[in-house]
Amino acid sequence: MRKTVLRKPKGFNDVYKHKPGAEKDRTHYCPGCGHGILHKLIAEAMEDLDIVDKTILISPVGCSVFAYYYFDAGHFQAAHGRAPAIATATSRANPDKVVISYQGDGDLAAIGGNNIIQAANRGENIAVFFVNNAIYGMTGGQMAPTTLEGQVTTTTPYGRNVDTDGYPMKMCEVISQLTAPTYVERVSLHDAPHIRKTRNAVRKALLNAKERKGFQFVEVLSTCPSGWKMDPVKSMEWVKEKMLGMYPLGVYRDKGEEAKVITRPVPILEPGTVWEKLGISAEADVDFPRGDVPDEYRKMSIRVAGFGGQGIMVTGQALASVALEYGYNVSWLPSYGPEMRGGTANCSVNIQDGTIGAAEAVKPTMLLAMNRPSLEKFEKTIVAGGTLIYNSTLIDIEPERTDIKVFAVPITGIADELGNTRVQSLVNVGAYAAITGMFNVDHVIELLPKLFKGKSQTIIDLNAKAVKAGFDYVKENF
Ligand SMILES: Cc1ncc(C[n+]2csc(CCOP(=O)(O)OP(=O)(O)O)c2C)c(N)n1
């Protein structure tokens, strides 16, 4: 006797545990939304094509931003419209993987319009699922490039006027003008027979992607009952009655048997290859022997924060540059507030022996807080057992955490005593060297001409004093 087993396809997680309130075994999509249907078709195909362990999904900005809650795949979340660029890098660096770029019409055809065209034109080995619901769903129903003529949205309250707003954009037609794409089809989710056709298109695109047969583009006409302000049944009818006329279904490109397997050299970012070609030496110029660094300071993820003009970025660059000379892997990532001067600024620095995963110090092992707002903002992010260095000249409150090591160093005061507030950065480096044991203070001073290349000897000497003063303060007081 045949037995029907109802279960989730293996391409989905059993429990959506990344989702807040994970015990609720359902998605965040509105009733009648097409995203859920397409998700299911993709998840089933992943299982049937045996690519669950090979799939990396790039989720966009839009209602499907949380696609990573559901799929049992690798994930990247891209900035708005940038999924094709992230997918390109992911696919090129991982030629054995199946890379999916999942995008809405605002994401793909508006802000990401150029991204998708360039990726298509390069014939990247990616499968793009383009959900065309003729509206910006997530942000409350604004006009999208695909909005129909006359369609009322929150930004076209009198209906889309093609004279002022342009014409609905037909992405399958646009993409299929290019030479490289392998497979381009438009399908729809408005009833069961068309969902079956969509199922086939999804499978074809993923099979081609699995075989590395270039660029796959499936446009899926979909519903947005919330954005369209219609019930789900009416929404299905609306797709059929209104959208199909503007967006004819069918295959726009299928290279079929002629589709070639596309292989590209995998970029290798090893010292001596790309570095050499770029004329950058990956080797440290000065070979500094490392001192005894306690275990807790061997894998540093540092947030340096303060206001603009406090030498925040220079501190971070100096820490990273000195560490490089000791043969550590380093990264430096600046983050500026929107203001030009006097605004907040912070940077993340990683200093480690192993591979650096994320450049941003989301949970730093050390915070160097130069002003009060920075302390208030970032103190809670320090990992338990981590270290806080704060500028006690300007910060007049006590840190709250009791599970971290705290060093109150009057950084601005020390710099002022040397006659120039601007040397705070190197006071920081000196204090850092004393606390962590990671740098020898003489080595740091030896490196100053390189760090301040082109600057006068007076400036170099002043910064040497700053390093020493920061170092000595910590050694004498802690
Ligand atoms: C750089 C940037 N600009 C604008 C936004 C606001 N925003 C979020 S989602 C969205 C539109 C999404 O629409 P669509 O791609 O059609 O996806 P849907 O929500 O309909 O699935 C916009 C404009 C943003 N998050 N980032």
Image (cartoon, rainbow, N blue to C red):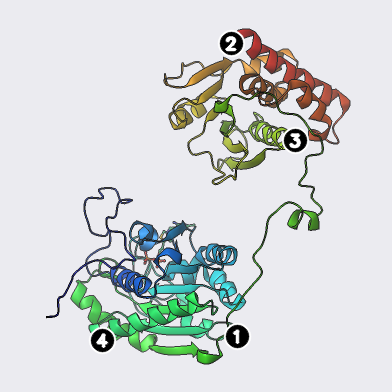
**Disc on the earlier residue, 4 or 2:** 4
Q: Which mark is residue 478?
A: 2
Residue highlighted by disc 3 = 325
**Disc on the earlier residue, 3 or 4:** 4
**Going 54% across and 76% down the picture, which residue do you hit?**
212
What is the three-letter code of the residue carrying label 3? Glu
Distance CA(mark 1)–CA(mark 3): 48 Å
Q: Residues within 10 Å of mark 2 (few under 14, many from 20)?
A: few
**Disc on the earlier residue, 3 or 2:** 3
What is the three-letter code of the residue carrying label 4? Pro
Disc 3 is placed on an element classified as helix
Q: Of 396 and 379, which appears nearest the observer?
A: 379
What is the three-letter code of the residue carrying label 2? Phe
Does 123 sit left or right of 9 as displayed? Answer: right
Where is residue 96? Give x, y as percent. Answer: 53, 68
Asked if the residue at tag 1 contacts the one at tag 2, i.e. Cβ–Cβ closer than 8 Å, the answer is: no
Vertical order, 253 against 17 (above or below): below
Q: Is mark 3 within 8 Å of ligand 1?
A: no
Vertical order, 364 against 99 (above or below): above
What is the three-letter code of the residue carrying label 1? Thr
Q: Residues within 10 Å of mark 3 (few under 14, many from 20)?
A: many
Q: Which mark is residue 219?
A: none
Where is residue 347? Give x, y as percent. Answer: 59, 37
Q: Nearer the viewer, mark 2 or mark 1?
A: 2
Distance CA(mark 3)–CA(mark 2): 27 Å
Q: Residue furthest top?
A: 476
